[in-house]
Image: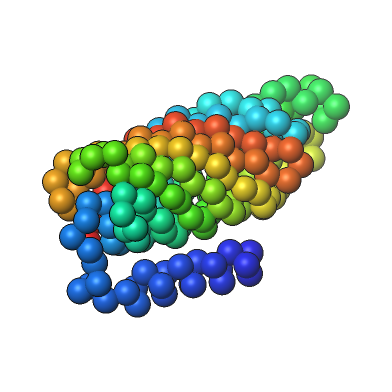
Amino acid sequence: MTKLIALFALTTTAAIATPAMAQEAAPFAGAHVGVEGGWGRVGGGSKVGGDGFVYGATLGYDVARGNLRVGPEIEIADSTQSECRPYASAGAGARLCERSDRDLYVGGRIGYVVNPKVLVYGKIGYSNARFSTRLEGTTAGNFDRATDRDGYRLGVGAEYAVTKAVYVSGEYRYSHYSADAHRNQILAGVGLRF
C-alpha cells in the first residue's frame, strides 16, 4: 500500500506541476479526468466468480510526440460483483459470499492518434484490489474478512473527441492478482481534457 501511495503522489504532482501554458494544441494532449462504468467478472483462485457493475474515476496526463501519446494514469473504482454458495461444512443453511470491493490503479498508457477525433491506446500498471468474504448462517454467527491483493493490469481502448474538451471512451482490461484471482472488465466512459 505504501508503494501505491507513493506512486499516486508522484503521478498527481507531475500532472499538477505541469504549467497550463505547456499544454499542446495537439488533440488528446494534456490533463484529463473521467468517469466510467460497465461490466466486470471475477474468477480464478478461490473466488466464486460472477458478474457485476464496475464504476470509477480516472485522472491522467498525455504528452504528445507526433501522433504518439504517452502518460501516467491513476484510477479508483468499485464493483457490485458478489456471489454466494452453500457452505455445508459450517452447518445446514450456511453460505459463503464473496465480493470484489474497491480497486486502486496506477499505471501508464501509450496511444496513437488515428485522426484528430480518435485515439487508440494500450495500458499497463499496478492494481491493488480488495476482496471481501462473508460466512453467513452459522450457529456461531456471521464472519467477515477482507483481503487486499496486489497485481497488474493490461488494457486496450479508444477515445473519441466529441469536442476539444469532451471525450467518450471504451476500454477492455484484464487484471491479475495474487492467489491467481483475476478480473475482466469492459467499460464505457466520458471525460474532460484541460
* Residue 35 spot, x, y in % from top left: 33, 47
Image quadrant occupied by the C terminus: bottom left
93 or 101, which lies in front?
A: 101
Residue 45 visible in the snapshot: yes
Please give left or right for residue 48 compared with residue 60 in the image.
right
> Residue 169 is drawn in which quadrant?
top left
| Extreme-front residue of the structure | 66
Total marks shown come to 0
185 or 95, which lies in front?
A: 185
* Residue 192 spot, x, y in % from top left: 23, 53
> Residue 170 is drawn in which quadrant?
top left
57 or 117, which lies in front?
A: 117
Q: Name the residue rendered at 43%, 50% in the picture.
A: 110
132 or 50, which lies in front?
A: 50
Q: Name the residue rendered at 65%, 41% in the picture.
A: 176
Q: Name the residue rendered at 34%, 58% in the picture.
A: 65
Please give left or right for residue 110 compared with residue 42 in the image.
left
| Extreme-right residue of the structure | 89
* Residue 53 spot, x, y in % from top left: 44, 33
Please give left or right for residue 135 compared with residue 192 in the image.
right
Q: Name the residue rendered at 69%, 23% in the picture.
A: 85
Q: How is the image coloured?
A: rainbow
Residue 136 visible in the snapshot: no
Q: Is residue 17 above or below residue 126?
A: below
Q: Is residue 51 above or below residue 142?
A: above
* Residue 1 spot, x, y in % from top left: 63, 64
